[in-house]
Image (cartoon, rainbow, N blue to C red):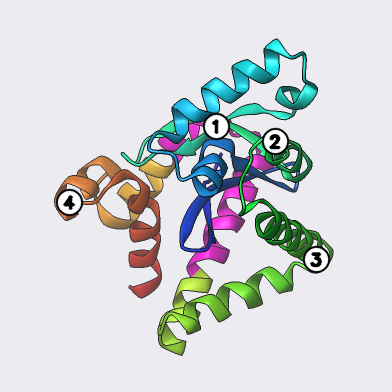
């Protein structure tokens, strides 16, 4: 399943997701960071059309991937990998272009390191939570929850569980067995948003 991650450049959030072990970044978010346009979506649409009209191959680097929108729903968004973003940046006049390229290169390099040594990703996540002020006990439980969730997802993939509907059915069955209620009922009971539901239920499994 597509999972949206957030990266931060100078206080601006950039959505990204992993595809074939590579980071793919939201082009609209990148445009927002570089241009500070009042409507980054409109800016990108206009730029994209201009590039197409010019016969530029830059747009071929873009693919529609589902990322979490501000309303919490997954929506198809133009995304590009590191090379594609570099090419797009060249078409955007901005004093932030060079520092952003350095930030992007560092982000991509860290991902390569994590693929070669998966423990690095875990260490970086722990360090991030620590910097945010969470206790060691909280961090340990959180990391255990992430590991359990990943193992469960991997097992379902091995058993060729299809995404979306079958995934939701299995999640509902596990939740019902654990809590006596389905994810939908749990969400209504706790007043949770969709993007927080899975983590909240997994957290309860660990704590009890």
Query: What residue did someone put label 4 on?
Result: 191
Extreme residue toward the top, this view = 53
Q: Is residue 16 left or right of residue 180?
A: right
| Nearest to N terminus: mark 2 or mark 1 | 2
- In this picture, which residue range is highlighted in magenta? 145-170
| Nearest to N terminus: mark 4 or mark 2 | 2
Q: Is residue 168 left or right of residue 114?
A: left
Extreme residue toward the right, this view = 116
Say above or below: 33 vs 136. above
Which label number is shown at residue 163? 1
* Main SS, magenta residues: helix
Say above or below: 24 vs 132. above
Residue at (40, 58) in percent of width and height? 199
The quadrant of the picture occupied by the C terminus is bottom left
- Comparing 89 with 162, the one in front is 89
The quadrant of the picture occupied by the N terminus is top right
Image position, residue 103 (x, y; %): 68, 61
Image position, residue 116 (x, y; %): 84, 64
| Nearest to N terminus: mark 4 or mark 1 | 1
Query: What residue did someone put label 3 on?
Result: 113
- Comparing 78 with 118, the one in front is 78
Q: Quadrant of residue 190?
A: bottom left
Which label number is shown at residue 88? 2
| Nearest to N terminus: mark 3 or mark 1 | 3
> Cα distance, mark 2 to mark 1?
31 Å
- Comparing 150 with 16, the one in front is 16
């Amino acid at each position: 399943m597509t999972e949206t991650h957030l990266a931060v450049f100078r206080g601006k959030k950039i959505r990204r997701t992993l595809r074939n072990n590579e980071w793919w970044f939201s082009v609209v978010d990148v445009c927002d960071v570089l241009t500070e346009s009042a409507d980054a979506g409109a800016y990108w649409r206009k730029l994209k059309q201009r590039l197409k009209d010019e016969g530029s191959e830059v747009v071929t680097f873009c693919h529609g991937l589902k990322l979490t929108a501000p309303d919490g729903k997954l929506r198809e968004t133009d995304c590009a990998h590191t090379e594609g973003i570099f090419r797009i940046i060249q078409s955007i006049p901005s004093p932030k272009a060079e520092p952003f390229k350095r930030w992007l290169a560092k982000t991509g390099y860290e991902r390569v390191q994590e693929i070669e040594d998966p423990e690095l990703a875990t260490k970086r996540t722990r360090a991030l939570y620590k910097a945010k002020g969470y206790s060691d006990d909280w961090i340990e439980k959180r990391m255990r929850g992430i590991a359990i969730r990943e193992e469960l997802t991997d097992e379902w993939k091995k058993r060729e569980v299809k995404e979306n509907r079958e995934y939701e059915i299995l999640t509902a069955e596990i939740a019902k067995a654990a809590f006596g209620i389905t994810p939908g009922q749990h969400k209504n009971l706790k007043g949770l948003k969709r993007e927080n539901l899975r983590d909240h239920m997994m957290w309860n499994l660990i704590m009890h």
